[in-house]
Amino acid sequence: MAGPRKALRVVAPGEGAPAPVKPKTVTEAADKGTTRELLVAMRSRIAKAVEDPNTPARDLAALTKRLTEVVRDIEAIDAREGQEAERGGPVSDEAFDAAAI
């Protein structure tokens, strides 16, 4: 049996979900973004080209292959960040102690 239910209430101003962040363009991400932001922008741009009916058929194979590669790169970055979060963040190097050898 479930525990007591919380009562619903009105959300106070500023308490709601944060406004969605507009994704960067490929150029913005290349100039001022992270590697992940650049990959996300590239993924969107490549996906648009794949969906465009005016994209030449000869280009679709290369575009879909590259799209798959970009998605894998994004997933790898996310997995790495997830592992770091589980460990409490990135681990910094400690000072070398020759006596410990």
Image (tube, rainbow, N blue to C red):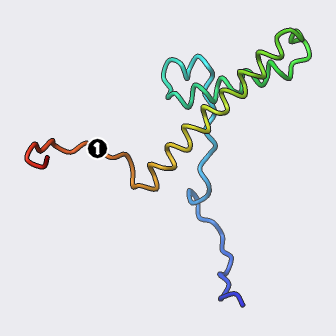
Residue 12, by quadrant, is bottom right
Q: Nearer the viewer, residue 50 or 58?
A: 58
Q: Secondary structure at mark 1?
A: loop
Q: Residue at x 82, y 11 (%)?
A: 59
Pick the front one: 41 or 23: 41
Taking the spot 66% from the left edge, 88% from the top edge, the residue there is 3
Q: Quadrant of residue 44?
A: top right
In the rendered view, does 56 fall on the left or right side of 70? right
Q: Is residue 101 above or below residue 52?
A: below
Relative to 30, is 19 above or below?
Answer: below
Q: Could you tell me residue 98's position as x and y percent? A: 10, 42
- Residue 27 on image: x %, y %: 58, 16
Q: Is residue 96 left or right of residue 64?
A: left
Q: Which residue is mark 1?
A: 92
Residue 34 x %, y %:
49, 29
Image location (x, y in percent) of residue 63: 77, 18
**Amino acid bearing label 1:** Ser
The residue under the point 39% across, 50% down is: 89
